[in-house]
Image (cartoon, rainbow, N blue to C red):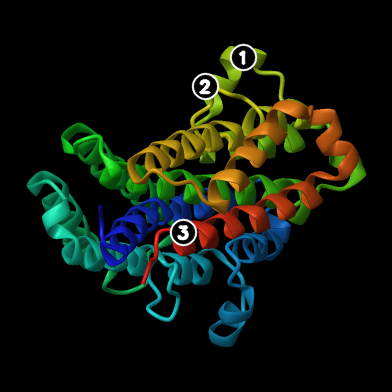
Amino acid sequence: MLLGRTANGLYWMSRYIERAENMARLIDAGLRMALTKTSNAPEEWSSVVTSSGANADFRKIYDNYNAITVSDYILKNPLNPSSVLSCLESARTNARMVRTALTREAWESINETWINFKSYLGHSSIPENDLPDLLATIKKETSLVRGIISGTMMRNEIYNFIKTSTYIERADNTARILDVKYYVLLPTIANVGTNLDNYQWESILRSVSAHRSYRWVYEGDYKPSHIADFLILNQRMPRSLNFCYHHIVQNLRYLGKEYHQEHQCHITAETQLKCFSDITINNVFDFGLHEFLNSFIAKNNQLNNEIAQAYNFV
C-alpha cells in the first residue's frame, strides 16, 4: 500500500504535466480566435485568462490583454502557479519526491522536459509570431512524457493514481476551452452561423486536437450543438468529458479493489459518469451550456478533494 505522501506526489506530478499541456492549448484557442476578430482582440485574450481562473491575479500584474501579456503570464510568469513553466517545475519536484515509484525512463523524461523548457521560457518575452511553434513543442513534449509513462510503468496502484489525475485535469481543461467560445466569446446574433462563427468553432476543435476526428463523425458540419456533443458526450473522443470520466471511474475501481475499500470519491465519479449516459446535448443546452460547464468544473474539483481525503494526501 502506498503512503499518502507518495500517492499525493504521483497524483500531482501527473496533474501538473497535463496542466502544462492544457495551458498551451488554452493559449492556442485564444490565439486562433483572436486572429478572426483582430478589432476586438483584447476581449478574446481576456476570455483566455478568465477561463484559466486567474483573471484577478493577472490584473495585479498587467494593464492590457494581448497575445504578449497573456502568453507571458500563462507560459512563464513565476507569480502564476499554473503557468507552463511553474507546472513543469512542480511536476519535476513531485516526480523527484516519488522517484523510486517511477521507472528510470519516466523520471528522466520529466526531468529533461523541465530542463528544456526552463531554457526556452526563462528569458525575454516570446514574440507573437513564435507562439504557434512553441505551443506545438509544449504539446509534443508533454505527450512524450505521458507516452513514456504509459509505455514503461507497471499497471498497479501507482499507475492508477497517475491516470486518474490526468483525466481529472483533462476534463477540467476541455470544459474551460469549450466555455471560452460559447460564453465568454459568444458572438453577436449577426455572426451566428457565418463563416466567422464556424471558423471560431473549428478553432476550438483544433485546440483540443479534435478537428479531424470531428470531421470523421460529422463530415465537417460545424454546428455548436454537434461540437458540444462531441466534446462533452462522445464516448470515443479522448478529450471529451464522458471519455475522461469513463477512465476516472475505471482507475478508481482498480484502486478500490487494491485497497479493498471504496469511498465517497467512487460514488461521485460513478454518479457523474451516469449523468453523461442519461442526458442528451439538447438537455445540456436547455439547462444552459455555460451553467452546465461551470457546474461540471465545480463537481470535478469536488472529486479531486474527495480523492485527496480518501487516500490521505499530505
Q: Is residue 13 above or below residue 189?
A: below
Q: How many marks can you see?
A: 3
Q: Residue furthest left?
A: 104
Q: Residue at position x 46%, y 51% from top? A: 22
Label 3 CA crowd tier, 10 Å (few <14, some 14–19, many 20+): some
Residue 238 x, y percent position in the rendering = 49, 30
Q: Position of residue 127 (x, y in %)?
A: 40, 63
User: Hey, which residue is sitting farthest front in the picture?
Assistant: 260
Q: Amino acid at mark 2?
A: Arg
Nearer to the camera, 90 or 272: 272
Quarter occupied by residue 145: top left
Q: Cα distance, mark 3 to mark 2?
A: 39 Å
What amino acid is at disc 1? Answer: Val
Which residue carries the number 1 mark?
A: 217
The answer to which of 104 and 285 lies nearer the viewer is 104
The mark found on residue 212 in the picture is 2
Q: Nearer the viewer, mark 1 or mark 2?
A: 1
Mark 3 lies on a secondary structure that is: helix
Label 2 packing within 10 angstroms: few (<14), some (14-19), many (20+): few
Compared with 42, 249 (above or below) is above
Mark drawn on residue 70: none
For label 2, the SS is helix
Residue 55's spot in the image, x, y percent?
63, 73
Q: Is residue 43 above or below residue 214?
A: below
Determine the CA span between mark 1 and mark 2. Answer: 9 Å
Circles 1 and 2 in contact, beta carbons < 8 Å: no
Distance from disc 3 to disc 1, alpha carbons, whole Å, reads 39 Å
Q: Residue at x 63, y 79 (%)?
A: 56
User: What label does residue 310 carry, if any?
Assistant: 3
Please tell me which residue lies in front, 175 or 208.
175
